[in-house]
Amino acid sequence: MSKDEVSIHILRKVVLDGFLFCGLGLLLFTANYIWMPFQRGFFCGDESLMFPYNNDTVTVLMLRIVGLALPILAFLICEWAVLRHDKDDQRCLGVRIPAWIRGFYCTAVSFGLGVCFVELTTQIAKNTIGRPRPHFFDVCQPSVDCDAPEWQRRYIQAHEYTCTGVLTEKFKDMRMSFLSGHSSWAAYTMIYLALYLEQRMTWRGTRTLRHALQFAVVMLSWFTALSRVSDYKHHWSDVLAGYSMGLAFAIIVWTWGTDLLKTKKDHAPLPQNEIHLTTCHAPAVSA
């Protein structure tokens, strides 16, 4: 394959990836800001909705930063360590692209697509189900008098009451308990990272360190999920569903959706155990 053909192949892949991310971003914007969640009613005696409103132990900003920064940093370090001496570089429009840059791009794009899939699946579930959060009564403060006989032992539909609470900015969010977005995001990002470390961090003498890092990131996701119950943000079933979904996506995207740049058989930048790697679908030519 000529150098021009290699450049076209690389540019086509980058452009297609960009269009895919833009399309997923548009769908996420629609699900988050345009699609209103289903408005479910309640029973006056439902004790699962009587918990107080608390602030998040793990804020959304903290969740996003840790969930993106840790994997991306790990991708950079590991791909550089494994491929930094690999001379199988390619050129795109005359610019040399080192092997470790290509390896990082392949992994980061696969990981990013999985993040978008998890987010979109979570928002579809939240908007479709419309399950009230455990602090529903505290935030909404429904206009019905639950002590009155006419409201006892019957399902009160959404059109039969209005919310009188002062936290008006939470009225939409209080109907989006199922499934837990914190749990699905934390499970996907951290378990994907643990699987990546198992495959790529294979240098001799790092096995104990690798397992310790894997345990640490999985525990971060586990703590995040449990905090959603103790903060009264979700019912336990919401957290279980969210964590299971994130776990499933991490395994599926890692197993069938991630391309790793294959190292040369005679190339060992750092002492490492033998490991089978899938191939990143980018043809190699000599510079």
Image (spheres, helix red, strand yellow):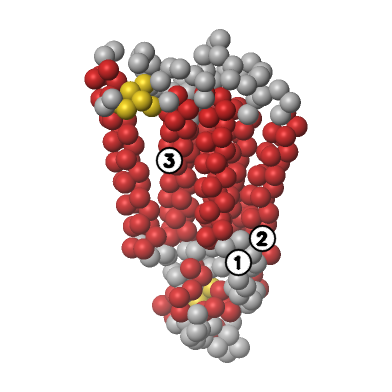
Q: Residue at x 58, y 20 (%)?
A: 269
Q: Nearer the viewer, residue 151 or 59?
A: 59
Percent from the top left, x then y, of residue 34? 33, 63
Q: Secondary structure at mark 3?
A: helix
Residue in front for this viewpoint, 217 or 188: 217
Q: Residue at x 61, y 61 (%)?
A: 58
The residue wearing badge 2 is 227
User: As shown in the figure, which amino acid type bears the numbered disc 3?
Assistant: Leu
Query: Is 112 left or right of 187, judged from the image as shown?
Result: left
The CA span between labels 3 and 1 is 27 Å
**In the rendered picture of this protein, how many numbered marks are placed on residues?**
3
- The quadrant where residue 274 appears: top right
**Marks 1 and 2: CB-CB under 8 Å?**
yes
- Residue 36 % position (x, y): 38, 65
Question: Of residues 12 and 169, which is closer to you in this image?
Answer: 12
Q: Is residue 8 visible?
A: yes
Q: Secondary structure at mark 1?
A: loop
